[in-house]
Image: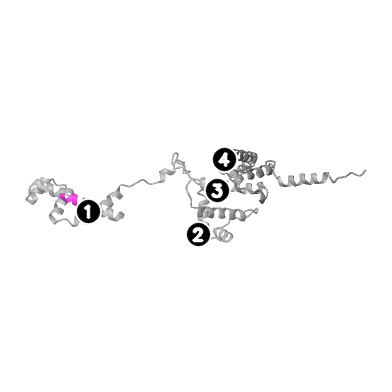
Amino acid sequence: MLIDMSTSRPAASARSAAQTRRTHDDAPDTARRFERLNSLEDGPERDAVRDEIVTAWLPMAHRIASRFRDRGEAVEDLRQVAALGLVKAVDRFDPERGAFESYAVPTITGEIKRHFRDRMWALRVPRRVQELRNKVRLARRDLTQNPGSREPSVADLAAHTGLTEEEVGAGLEALESFSTLSLDAELPTGDDGYSLADTLGGPDASYDTVIDRESAKESLRSLPERERAILYMRFFEDMTQSRIADRLGISQMHVSRLISRSCERVRQEALGHRHDGDA
């Protein structure tokens, strides 16, 4: 018995084509909704259709986000970033250019990668250094993918990437700088409670003393000889004002005025020198 397959073949071909286009279970057929979306003006009805499309493709966005789950970011946060990328893909998609999935996947993936690049560094690193890090990371992966491959040297990485050895060095440093170490973290020194903070120095007040002393030197040299002698006897020989007055044959009140006037002059000139240096 002959069976006419002319009516069933087109249907089978259509199903086969649909299966080819829909490579994942979370890739829904939203072609008609995109056509309707593009035919509507801005307003509540268009927003509702847009929300339907986003909701339909959200499982795919979550699947893409799950690929990055082991990189130090919470899955829920990754899903939110992926959802943002999905919304951008829906708003920018042109149905005449092909299937939505082919456009949405790189858009969502790029949004997640930008999130890691711009938000996940513990310290803000220049974009150029981040790009060097990515090039070095990929080169290291390429050079060590075969079993038994040795760890590539800086020269090997430079030859593979076309970078200079200095640029490779910056990329290698960035590879180790994605996260920071707490100052309270204990160090493997064998001493209980010894942390990274214990290895750091603190502010030294002696530096301020050195700066003040150097700033005052020139002003002290410019004082009249008698005033310099009075300051020396008072502050270096620890003599009282009355003893200084007896030695110089002047009143104690005069000694007090000379000390105050000399100190104020030195102070003003030292502060003026410091401000000139800061400028």
What residue does disc 3 label? 114
Q: Which one is in front in this view, the residue at disc 2 or the one at disc 1?
A: 1
What residue does disc 2 label? 166
| Sequence order check, earlier mark of 4 and 3 | 4
Residue 22, x across and y down, in percent: 71, 45
- The residue type indicated by label 3 comes to Arg
Q: Do the numbered discs 2 and 1 sit on residues whose CB atoms are within 8 Å?
A: no
The answer to whether residue 166 is left or right of residue 86 is left
Can residue 265 be found in the magenta stretch?
yes
Span highlighted in magenta in the image: 261-268
Mark 3 crowd level (few <14, some 14–19, many ≥20, 10 Å Cα): few
> What residue is shown at x 19% (from left), y 55% (from top)?
220
Residue 81, x across and y down, in percent: 56, 42
- The residue type indicated by label 2 comes to Glu
What residue does disc 1 label? 269
> What residue is shown at x 59% (from left), y 54% (from top)?
138
| SS for callout 1 | helix
Outermost residue on the left side: it is 249
